[in-house]
Image: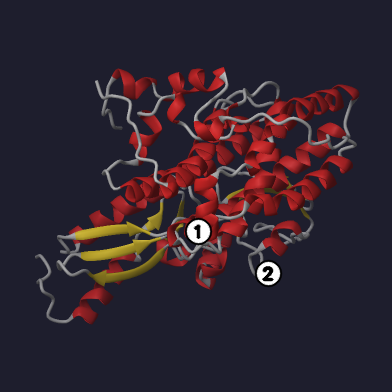
Amino acid sequence: MPAPFPPADTAALLAQARAVAATVSDPEIPVLSIDDLGVLRSLKISEDGALEIVITPTYSGCPAMNMIALELELALEKAGFDRVKVTTVLSPAWTTDWMTEDGKRKLKEYGIAPPSEKRAGRGALFGADEVECPRCGSVRTARLAEFGSTSCKALWQCQDCREPFDYFKCH
Amino acid sequence: MAKTIRVNETPLVLYTLRRADDALILGHRLSEWCGHAPMMEEDMALANMALDLIGQARSLYTYAGEAEGEGRTEDDFAYWRDDRGYRNALLVEQQNGDFARTIMRQFLYASFADLYWRAMMKSKDETLAAVAAKSEKEMAYHVRHTAEWVIRLGDGTTESHARIAAALDELWAYTGELFEMDASEKGLVDAGIAVDLASLRDQWRANVKAVLEEATLTTPEDGWMQKGGRTGIHSEHLGHLLSDLQHVQHTIPGAVW
């Protein structure tokens, strides 16, 4: 059943919409929701009564963004929101600092090393990274390739258990 | 068949298109390596960097369309201008050549773009400042990656040293144009929208020189510099590139995936 417009209780409606939106996952890293990633920025009811969802790309050319926008529309329509508008904003620029602790834990369990604890920034980029192997926990790891299977990841290898693994780059 | 568009180039539109065209053309050049790079990791890296640049171009074209106010989309700018309508610097349209040449071209550009976008984060134009904040993070990775390759090739074998040295020698004359500004651009600098490119040149040279020295390469003197790209006078390479880039749209105008 479509949600009533104009909404009787905007706050409750937005909370409901946000809960639905937060179930949408990153198609490239399905264990992470767009909420875990910090890609889901805000929701509001626009003047014409449509539900507006603001998302931000992790990288300029992130091919997952179109998919995420589509899945958001589908999920919300299914939940009864019949007019949904997804807007992409660049500012403020997304940073790995927005990833939730829960998100980092899920990432590690999935086998991807989360961005290291240090605050993301140029220091982290050019300093000596310390990346923990998500499999055995060793910090004796080495970067094999700066650019991995997706823009947000680099390819690393553990010197102890010898497993190659993806590292979610600080950004 | 749709006709070649003539853009109403107000200073802001022109400025935005110059940046967008640099990113699109260089992104396209890098994408030509897809499936041809010397190793799998590098194939991924070049494609990743191409994706960053094309993503930056998309944001900038969309903004150019808004600033022009004629309802043009990113696709209109990419597919319906001829070479004379393109405003990219000549450096980015130069052919890939061997791997050393591609890496040197990317290193010289990324070293510029990294400084440029970082400075542009302070632009009074909110959209350009937002694109800058996104792009500078990406370009920092491009600088690090290509600098590592420049060092590895320069301080490598006799063959790799000779090739990267030749690439530097060939491409250096295209670097002056990156810092070129005309009257319309100077007006935007005064308005706090654009960055004074001349102010970036010393830092760029110092950053580039430090890497070249580590690579046992000699930084060339700034001699006579090529220019023309910013006003639409291009090398023959751009026409060939565009015929490839625009082929599908010109065959089936309006085609979408």
Which chain letter matches label 1? Answer: B
Say the numbered circle drawn on residue B173.
none
Q: Residue at x 85, y 23 (%)?
A: B162
Q: Nearer the viewer, residue B240 or B148?
A: B240
Asked whether residue A79 is in view, the answer is: yes
Residue at x 47%, y 56% (from the top left corner): B128
Q: How is the image coloured?
A: secondary structure
> From the viewer's perspective, is the residue at label 2 or at label 1 nearer?
1
Residue A7 percent coordinates (x, y): 13, 76
Using the image as rendered, state which of residue A77 and residue A54 is in the foreground.
A54
Residue on which the image places disc 2 = A118
Q: Secondary structure at mark 2?
A: loop
What is the three-letter code of the residue carrying label 2? Answer: Lys
Q: Are marks 2 and 1 in contact (CB under 8 Å)?
A: no
Q: Which mark is residue B193?
A: 1
Specify the quadrant of the image occupied by residue A63.
top left
Q: Nearer the viewer, residue A126 or B219?
A: B219
